[in-house]
Image: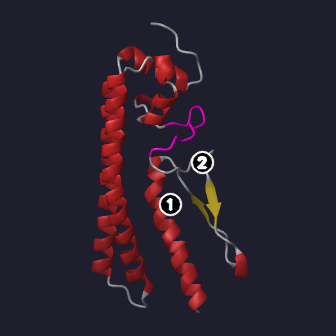
Amino acid sequence: MREKVRGCRWGLGLVVLCALIAPFGCDRPGRESKTSPAGSGEKAQTMIVPPPPGQPQPPPPPGQESPIEAYLFPPDLIMVHQTEIGIRDEQREDIIKAVQEAQSKIMRLQWEMHQATALLESLLAGSRVDAAKTLDTSKRITEIEGEIKRIHLAMLIGIKNQLSEEQQHQLSELRRGRAPQGR
């Protein structure tokens, strides 16, 4: 019985984690995935593991970016192509600062989310579930998730605003796999 409860907790943790990271595009092909051990007849579960914050992420397959992503430029794309697009030292420093500020805020929120997720798991583990507390905790997790998305979007907007129109055009071309052409 104890093994079954532990398996349910593990499954719930995976579901919550995947639900929280999926909006960030971590479920795209090419991302690292880890599969839980499938011993003792349990169904194997796959968890998508994104790269650590600040680490370059593999580009999405062509044509699989969201409409919003098509207008924004992740810092790793800029970093890889900084020479081709002519990033100035001032731009580089401003982009690094924006990424560091976002990472710092997101790290705090991740700690808070982990704590709230553990609380949610403990609330659901009992034979009777306090619906009000559970729903409040779930709401808090959703709020944290929204705040992380807002911080991430604000960072990407700030980065885009650091780039000239020409640099944005060049990055769009590079993202599509074409050599940038002068305008």
Toward the top, the furthest residue is 183
Would you say 146 lies left or right of 7 here?
Answer: left
Is 62 magenta? The answer is: yes
Name the quadrant of the N terminus.
Answer: bottom right
The label on residue 31 is 2
Q: Dominant secondary structure of the magenta stretch?
A: loop
Q: Which stretch did the figure color magenta?
A: 54-65
Amino acid type, label 2: Arg
Residue at 48% of width from left, 7% of height from top?
A: 182
Q: Where does the image place residue 178, in percent across and percent down from the top left? A: 59, 18
Image location of residue 33, percent across then percent down? 62, 56
Q: How many marks?
A: 2
Q: Quadrant of residue 91?
A: top left
For disc 1, the neighbor class at 10 Å (few under 14, some 14 to 19, many from 20) is some
Q: CA distance from mark 2 to mark 1?
A: 13 Å
Looking at the image, which residue is at 33% across and 61% down?
Answer: 142
Q: Secondary structure at mark 1?
A: helix
Residue at numbered disc 1: 18
Q: Is residue 65 above or below residue 105?
A: above
